[in-house]
Image (cartoon, helix red, strand yellow):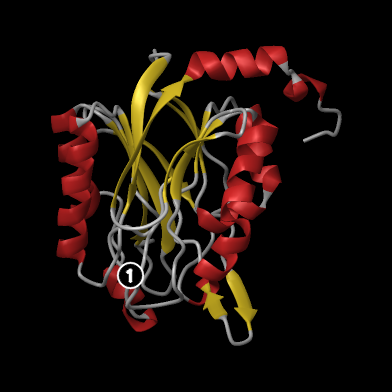
Amino acid sequence: MATSRFPAACIQMRVVADKARNLELAEKLIEEAAGGGARLVALPEMFFWRGRLADHRAAAERIDGPTIERLGRLSARLGITLVVGSILEDPGDPDALPFNTMVVLGPAGECLGVYRKIHLFDIEIPGKVRERESERMQPGSTPVCIDTPAGRLGLSVCYDLRFPELYRALVRAGAEILLVPAAFTATTGAAHWEVLLRARAIENQCWLMAPAQIGPVDSGPPVWGHSCIIDPWGEVAAMRAEGEGIVPAEIDLEELARVRRDFPCLEHARVPA
């Protein structure tokens, strides 16, 4: 049974091609968040590695590999629910591209759920950004909503944010807290990051946690950062624009229930799923 009010935290970090450095930093920030009382902690997309396209297959790991095993031990020691923003998941087929995979770990270190990013970011803005995720990973196909000690989580990753139908499917499956770990580009982030996050929270009357990568980067386009936690009315409860660190806020599921009771737009939906 989820506690109706509890501290939570997003983690914002710079990610490099050195896994050991990334994991050590992630562990330090997770412990800092938990030390401040956070019972739900979320890491950014691809928090464990950011390197050259040619090295993506070599960087991929199985879900039961060393990174998730190590973080499972940490979540058990701290007694928290830990959202592993995403890793490159080895699909077990040498001819197949990795998945961009989120894993949620429970307070006993157990795996509570796995989500593979559905929407891949393929875009080219001349002179600004070129990014083709489909060249280095394959898409998932299934929305995932899971029960945790911190509430029912609806899972998504980065570019998924631009597809509102995914979030409506998650809220219809009972989501209370939407997770959007990201490495949003600086170009699109400056224009759309906050407004899209607030829109997803407002239209689905959910809490939303968006832990993000921050620059400078060694590989790929610059990233926007601005990790944040947003309430079901669309207000930004906490945000960190720059630098590595934690973004803490209190999640209040009673507030979510009040918003849905007083403004029951989810009950008024008429377009079939």
- Position of residue 165 relative to residue 183, above or below, is above
Image coordinates of residue 103 in percent, x first then y, are 36, 44
Q: Is residue 212 above or below residue 42?
A: below
Q: Is residue 189 left or right of residue 100?
A: right
Q: Residue at x 77, y 19 (%)?
A: 267
Give how far across and how far down residue 161 sits, in percent.
60, 51
Q: Quadrant of residue 192?
A: bottom right
Which residue is at 46% across, 55% downward?
182
Q: Residues within 10 Å of mark 1 (few under 14, many from 20)?
A: many
Give the labeled residue for mark 1.
50
In front of the other: 59 or 62 = 59
Q: Quadrant of residue 18?
A: bottom left
Can residue 200 be seen here? The reply is yes
Q: Residue at x 29, y 27 (%)?
A: 39
What is the x, y in percent for residue 122? 60, 72
| Placement of 74 over or under 184, stated as above or below | above
Q: Quadrant of the N terminus?
A: top left
The amino acid marked with disc number 1 is Arg
Q: Secondary structure at mark 1?
A: loop
Query: Can residue 65 be spotted in the picture?
Result: no
Classify 121 as above or below 209. Answer: below
